[in-house]
Amino acid sequence: MAKKELNLGILAHVDAGKTTLTERLLYEAGAIDELGSVDAGTTQTDSLTLERQRGITIKSAVASFALQDVHVNLIDTPGHPDFIAEVERVLSVLDGAVLVISGVEGVQPQTRILMRALERLRIPTLVFVNKIDRPGAGDERVVHTITERLTTAVVPMGTAHALGTRGADFTLSSAEDSVFRARLAEVLAEGDEGIMAAYVEDESELPYQLLRDALAAQTKRALVHPVFFGSAVTGAGVESLMIGIAELLPASTGDPDGPVSGTVFKIERGTSGEKIAYVRMFSGTIHTRERLRFGSGLEDKVTAITVFERGPAVQRPAVSAGAVAKLWGLSKIQVGDRIGETGTDASDHHFTPPTLESVVVAGKPDDRARLRVALEQLAEQDPLIDVRQDDTRHELSVSLYGEVQKEVIQATLANEFDLEVTFRETTPICIERPLGTGEAIEFLHAESNPFLATIGLRIDPAPDGSGVDFRLRVDPRTVPLYLYKTGERFSERMGAYARETLREGLFGWQVTDCIVTMTKCIYSVPDGPPSKRGPLSTAADFRKLTPLVLMQALECAGTVVCEPTVRATVEIPTGSVGAVLAALARLDAAVEPPSLRGPLSLIETVLPAARAHDLQQRLPGLTGGEGVLDSSFAGYQSVSGHQPTRRAYDAESVEG
Ligand SMILES: Nc1nc2c(ncn2[C@@H]2O[C@H](COP(=O)(O)OP(=O)(O)OP(=O)(O)O)[C@@H](O)[C@H]2O)c(=O)[nH]1
Ligand SMILES: [Mg+2]
């Protein structure tokens, strides 16, 4: 019988203790004999030189251990917001997650962002309140902020003692604990009519085993989130968490004999530069030397397979449903590709895509070609950096989440590719939204139309955040079915041509939040009536004519450039409110009235993403080093005044 597998993500705000907890779990489960530490740079999952030097996780990493009859693949993820793309790629392969919250700092901005994604994807999640050994750690206070700011569907699974001391510990509640039983009944009643009825009648009559079973069932359905407390450093509470992982999270039960299906969630390069793909198998079995189909219909042969076993990866002849493996030999594979079938998960975004970009300049002009190859290799591992070269200056630019990511790219290029680079100033990636409705049509046989088709397109504005929607509003008899088989297929391809066109709008930015409607469609046929007569239209005619018509429609509609904004919460000493408000006014920030809480005050503000960095840098000076800034993406807002064009570098910032 196939082993039970649990693919478990460890997620949290930066520095909450994910890597330390991962190391502790591996140690307690006997997968490693010696406990490494982040501060000494000796953990299993922070294995990159840069991670060890900086003491932060940059890439997600896998390690495994056995827990009762379950084989657990732990995926340790980075918490820094600049590396959220790493978390994104992992989400689609998880059976469950542990969300780590620091017992001292409590719920932090990234905690909320992660919890929202976990809830949206219905990933069963346990909460681990870490660092209970540190002075200032809380228990009830933290649970209170969890219910206030994350979710009310939580059940603390026990009690923490001697908080804030080295001897801090955690005891699981038992059947005899009436407060625990009451809390269980109350939370579980929400998702279980039987418990609800009994709860209203007399909650103390509910059998404990029934509550435990319902807890496991509802946790596995991501309806309820059990909360554990402990310390990854001292090991307190970790055994209880492990019991919870085994009992409350759903090990996967894929079919090893079914059709092959897996998802690639990470790509790395081996010691001799070969590509290694991390795949999570959902169904079927892959053997070495087997040819696999993946991504956009590509094929390649697997030359070697390793699976994770008690810590590191070991070579195996095959990998089956449920497991995570590293595959060699698939040279054309990309992050997000599905294996065994075509398609990709890479376009399902759960978090905001990068909102910044910067030009990367090779230290030596001769290195430009090598730089391009190196950046393309980095983009294999992180497609969101989206390497681009502009046509006139041939400059290379990448999309970024922030300054730390920039430093990491710079260090990686130096260490792994022996390339010294500098970055130009970081600028926001704007978008364009249509201002009004625009319509255009190109007729078959018209002089202005070099292609064999009539296409009419309309573009209309749509609500913010809605993306690009394509609609077909033509007589079904006019659709070239001989090219596209079905109307749906035609609509899908036309939608793809339209989206491709809208990657660059009137000012060079991606156009979004609009509806494109096809209003007219004619193709030419050799034996058709005179108006349609001509050589038979090909798919290329439709593909090439779409951008011409759509850009004309867009010109009619007009567009407005919108820049990314962030919502920042600034916590500062009340004495510096005046100075901070004045600085915010200079940064064009929309400020809500400050809420004064005794010696500390909170200011909520929305400001352009490009300015948030300035604010971050000025804050220590304005607040005597006491100010704290938390920020999260807050959508796009139209740029007032001059509409910036993409790649409009002013002359003095371009050297040479
Ligand atoms: N006192 C105490 N310190 C802890 C605990 N867990 C982690 N730390 C410390 O907190 C710091 C961050 O720990 P990491 O494990 O690197 O945190 P992380 O969540 O993996 O951080 P990123 O991956 O960079 O987001 C390190 O200095 C750890 O030693 C804990 O339970 N108690
Ligand atoms: Mg880490």
Image (cartoon, grey):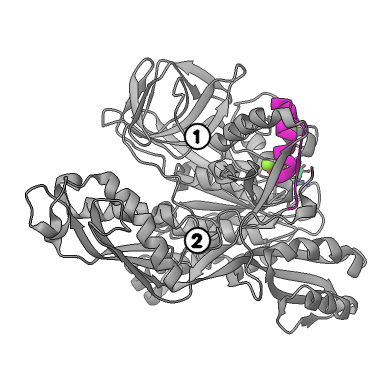
Circle 1 sits on which residue?
72
The mark total stands at 2
Question: What's the amino acid at mark 2?
Answer: Gly
Q: Position of residue 130 (x, y in %)?
A: 68, 51
**Real-space CA distance between mark 1 and mark 2, rounded to the nearest whole angstrom:** 47 Å
Q: Quadrant of the N terminus?
A: top left
Q: Would you place residue 63 above or below residue 317 in this image?
A: below
Secondary structure at badge 2 equals loop
Secondary structure at badge 1 equals strand
Badge 1 or badge 2: first in the primary sequence:
1
- Tell me the quarter of the picture where residue 615 sits: bottom right
Q: Would you place residue 227 above or below residue 280 in this image?
A: below
Q: Which residues are magenta?
A: 405-425
Q: Nearer the viewer, mark 1 or mark 2?
A: 2
Q: Position of residue 344 (x, y in %)?
A: 39, 42
Q: Was residue 414 drawn as part of the magenta stretch in this picture?
A: yes
Q: Quadrant of the C terminus?
A: top right
Residue at point 64% right, 25% down?
32
Direction bottom: furthest residue: 593
Residue at point 74% right, 32% down?
365
Q: Was residue 462 drawn as part of the magenta stretch in this picture?
A: no
Mark 2 surroundings within 10 Å by alpha-carbon count, few (fewer than 14), some (14 through 19), many (20 or more): many
